[in-house]
Image (spheres, rainbow, N blue to C red):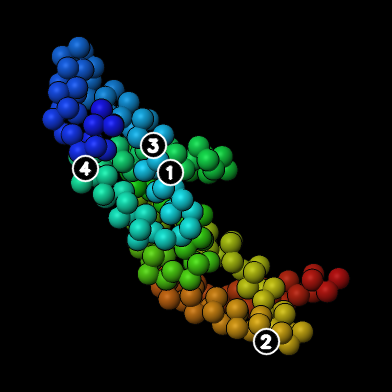
Amino acid sequence: MTKALLAGNKDEYNKTKERLLNDGYTEEAIASGVKYALSETDEIKKIIEVRRSGDYDTFDELRESLVSKGFDKNVVYGASDVAFNKETPKEKTETPQKDTPKYSNDDLFNSINMGYTNNSIKIINQMKSEGKENSYIRSAITKEYKTKYYELKYKAFVTNNETAKSELNKMKSTLKNLKIGIDFTSWDKGYYEWKKGANK
């Protein structure tokens, strides 16, 4: 069935699906089988490569191209999640319970690190639509970047490293542009305690 849709043969797909339904298979069982088969295809492997690169516009375009071939949207999104999580064991705890287009924290961090502000905002909005609170996302970003912020600030102003100054300004600008309320004043309050520990 998967090969039929990939080849653009919807008639063959529909005939096979009808035969399976007549044989007693449920819609859910058929969809699950298609999802698994699709997750093993080169098309999904390409989608995973693009996802890892942080190019989420192309990532979404490739998924939608499969939907346009006749695959159910949830099947496509589920297949890409199955393949991604199979290759990334550390993210198994974030595997969606439903076949929905969920993004992980790592997806967001990769996008931020690549400098893709618009993609990052898009991911944040998607995460919010999936029930993640603004405070959760802000906390995750704080946990990921606050120590890096301290390290750059130390290099920039204690060792007078110009590259660190540039990276620090870029980080602040990027995180501010996400508009989720990153409080650098609060971060700065903890900087001096962190610096004491760094100088021990």
- Asked which secondary structure carries label 4, the reply is loop
Where is mark 4, residue-wise? 69
Residue at the right extreme? 200
- Classify mark 1: residues with Cα within 10 Å, few (<14), some (14-19) or many (20+): some
Label pair 3/1, CB-CB below 8 angstroms: yes
Quarter of the picture containing the N terminus is: top left
Q: Distance between the residues labelled 1 and 2?
A: 40 Å
Asked where in the image residue 158 lies, by quadrant, the reply is bottom right
User: At 46% across and 60% down in the image, what residue appears?
Assistant: 54
> Which quarter of the rendered picture does the C terminus lie within?
bottom right
Q: Which amino acid does label 4 sit on?
A: Lys
Amino acid type shown at disc 2: Glu
Q: Is residue 80 visible?
A: no
First of labels 1, 2 by sequence position: 1
The kind of residue tagged 3 is Thr
Q: Name the residue under label 2.
A: 162
Give me the C-alpha separation between circle 3 and circle 4: 14 Å
Mark closer to the chain start, 1 or 4: 1
Q: Please tell me whether residue 2 is drawn above or below residue 199 in the rendered image.
A: above
